[in-house]
Amino acid sequence: MNEPKESRTEAPTRRQRSAVRAFIAAHGTPACAVVAPVGRRGARVALIGGDGAMGDVMVSSISSGEALTEAVDELARADWDAETVNRTAIGSAHRRRMGRSLLRG
């Protein structure tokens, strides 16, 4: 039986830190991040800006995502709770696109 590989925390790259800082500069504070697993790919760091805009950065593991959130002072760690979801501003075009993908089934 294969044993699960131990995930090691990789330090955030300059490119990842720059992407987060650029997002915050464009969308304001308070900004927060939710780190979630994405299959074998690693993890997604979902960003929510002060204006409710959403963005994301892909990282190699959950622990790497957590390290990225700690590396950027203006970024607070969050969970997908009611408060975080209510901070997002999802436009009608995005809602239509997501609804259309569900209908294709």
Image (cartoon, rainbow, N blue to C red):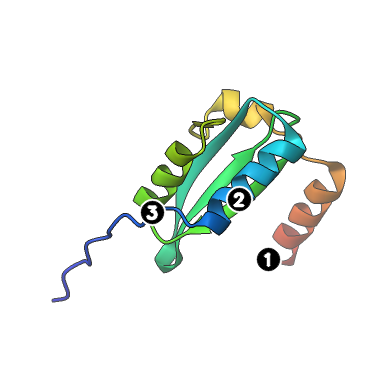
When the figure is inspected, residue 20 is found, relative to residue 25, above or below; the finding is below
When the figure is inspected, residue 66 is found, relative to residue 61, above or below; the finding is above
Q: Earlier in the sequence, mark 2 or mark 1?
A: 2
Alpha carbon of mark 2 to alpha carbon of mark 1: how far? Answer: 37 Å
Alpha carbon of mark 3 to alpha carbon of mark 1: how far? Answer: 39 Å
Disc sitting over residue 18 in the figure:
2
Residue extending furthest left? 1
SS at mark 3 in the image = loop
The answer to whether mark 2 and mark 1 are in CB contact below 8 A is no
Q: Which residue is mark 3?
A: 11
Task: Name the residue type under label 2.
Answer: Ser
Alpha carbon of mark 2 to alpha carbon of mark 3: how far? Answer: 13 Å
Task: Name the residue type under label 3.
Answer: Ala
Disc sitting over residue 27 in the figure:
none
Task: Name the residue type under label 1.
Answer: Gly
SS at mark 1 in the image = loop
Q: Assign the N terminus to one quadrant of the image.
A: bottom left
Q: Residue, x 63% and y 25% (percent of image)?
A: 30
**Picture coordinates of residue 27 (x, y %)?**
74, 36
Q: Residue, x 60% and y 50% (percent of image)?
A: 18
Q: Assign the C terminus to one quadrant of the image.
A: bottom right
Q: Nearer the viewer, residue 85 or 70?
A: 70
When the figure is inspected, residue 74 is found, relative to residue 20, above or below; the finding is above
Q: Residue, x 31% and y 54% (percent of image)?
A: 9
Q: Earlier in the sequence, mark 3 or mark 1?
A: 3
The answer to whether mark 2 and mark 3 are in CB contact below 8 A is no
Q: Residue, x 42% and y 61% (percent of image)?
A: 60
